[in-house]
Amino acid sequence: MAVTTKLLLAILLSVFLLSAANAIRDYQGQHGQQGQRDTRLTQAQQCRVQRLTGSQPSERIDSEGGFTELWDENEEQFQCAGVAPMRNVVRRNSLSLPNFHPMPRLVYIERGQGMMGITYPGCAETFQSQQSFQAGREPREERGQGRQSDQHQKVHRIRQGDVVAIPAGAAHWCYNDGEEDLVAVSVNDLNHQSNQLDQNLRAFYLAGGLPESGRQSVQIGQRRQSTQRFQNIFRAFDRELMAEAFNIPAEIVRKMQEDQSERGLIVNVKEGMRMVRPDEEREEFEEQGRGQQWWEEAIGNGLEENICTMKIRTNMEHRRQADIYSRQAGKINHVNRQKLPILKYMDMSATKGTLYPNAMMTPHWSVNGHCVVYVQRGDAQVQVVDHRGQQVMNDRVNQGEMFVVPQYFASTMRSGQNGFEFVVFRTSSEPMNNQLAGYTSVIRAMPIEVLTNAYQISPNEAQHLKTNRGGESFLLSPQRKSF
């Protein structure tokens, strides 16, 4: 009898616990869905765009070795996309100081060349300046200089046309060793899941910083204090504590904490910087005819997809790599997570486009992300239409301007007499577009009967609507009326 009672109590307790677990799961599911709905509603409210226009930087921060230009992330169109654009100009023999930020950043090298280091947490310093790949060869960095050996993570060569992926939280620096200014245009994705702070652009610097009064020489609209967003984090730590942490004299820590705000965020380098870069060694071997396959067999370690060795850049200038090419209209080169796998983790991508004079980009909409367009060269007439059937943009955009095309908003552009070059930063690692005109358009895919009834046109007119662009797709050449 006692055994039966205990068994009955155990069954009742199990049923009670199961019911409670189901109730908790249902509660969490309902509230989780509600939270997701609230997030989407907040984003939707931010995307009630009334007007889009080409925008210039609203703020400039001057430094010793260059300057930084910021677009206003509080501007309606940038708030809608959840991005903060910026442009850095690093002068010859100058260093953009090490810093990290809580959101991913996609960078386009508009002009110049240089070296960039991106430091990943937990990765080994696998490059040593006094060692050479070829046995018995004197390292060119060390010939006659008597420098001590130095170990560090990989240093990348960056050139005009490169798109560079900088993950959230990765410390990075950039040095201009070229003969002209290095111009880098960047978009920071404030809405990325890695950023759990707020929707404000901020960067944590490991050196340098700004004076308390700020260094803005251009300021439009509501004033923002850049000094609060770009400061050396070592300044606030206790000196003795840092000396103990690094096991170094307090005098060195004092220099790390010293107020050098007059130098800013980009500083001059007294002597040229020289460090081991495996890609230069690779170029030498390829010039000697040994080729890429030999190099990969020689140094490949099978860890290409590991975060420590993952590729962080690719070039968008090569015509042979264009995804879309038209002799009459132009070319398009997409860089997504297929070409640059690290973009999968950043959920961003980029496109480099060239429109020949008077050519068009077909009317289309982006299915899975916002588009932030930077005008690199030339001009174009841009039209954007929202879900209300109203124009939110009908402007001519010019070199140096930036504008947003929100997700699902239909847009088109026609280049001017001198052509049009642009870069699109997208908030999706695998972007998709739906086209309204051309060979692969949604209009061409519809039956003629649907078009005749939808637009009250004849079957012959519907046939022209479907097929008059022939085999042209995303890029449309200048055309005269065919009827």
Image (cartoon, rainbow, N blue to C red):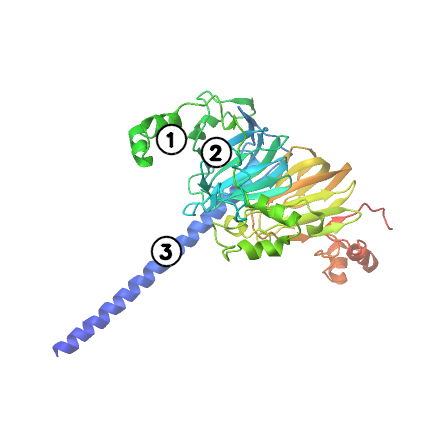
Distance between the alpha carbons at the discs numbered 1 and 3: 41 Å
Hey, what amino acid is under mark 3? Gln
Q: In the rendered structure, find residue 146 and report the number of the disc placed on it.
A: 2
Q: Is residue 281 above or below residue 250?
A: below
Is the C-beta separation of discs 1 and 3 under 8 Å? no
Say which amino acid is labelled 2. Answer: Gly
Q: Which mark is residue 28?
A: 3
CA separation, marks 1 and 2? 31 Å
Q: In the displayed structure, would residue 309 be above or below residue 414?
A: below
**Which residue was labeled with disc 1?**
234
Compared to 55, does 428 lie above or below? Answer: below
Q: Answer left or right for 244 relative to 325.
A: left
Q: Residue at x 61, y 38 (%)?
A: 109
| Precedes in sequence: disc 2 or disc 3 | 3
Q: Is residue 52 something one can see in this rendering?
A: no
Name, please, the residue furthest toward the front.
136
Residue 376: image x %, image y %? 67, 36
If you read the primary sequence from the N terminus, does the residue marked by circle 1 or circle 3 appear first? 3
Q: Label 3 near label 2: C-beta < 8 Å? A: no
Secondary structure of the residue carrying numbered label 2: loop
Q: Position of residue 414 (x, y in %)?
A: 74, 41
Relative to 389, 245 lies left or right: left
Q: Give the crowd class for mark 2: few <14, some 14-19, many >=20 residues within 10 Å.
A: few
Badge count: 3
Precedes in sequence: disc 1 or disc 2: 2
Quadrant of the image for the N terminus?
bottom left
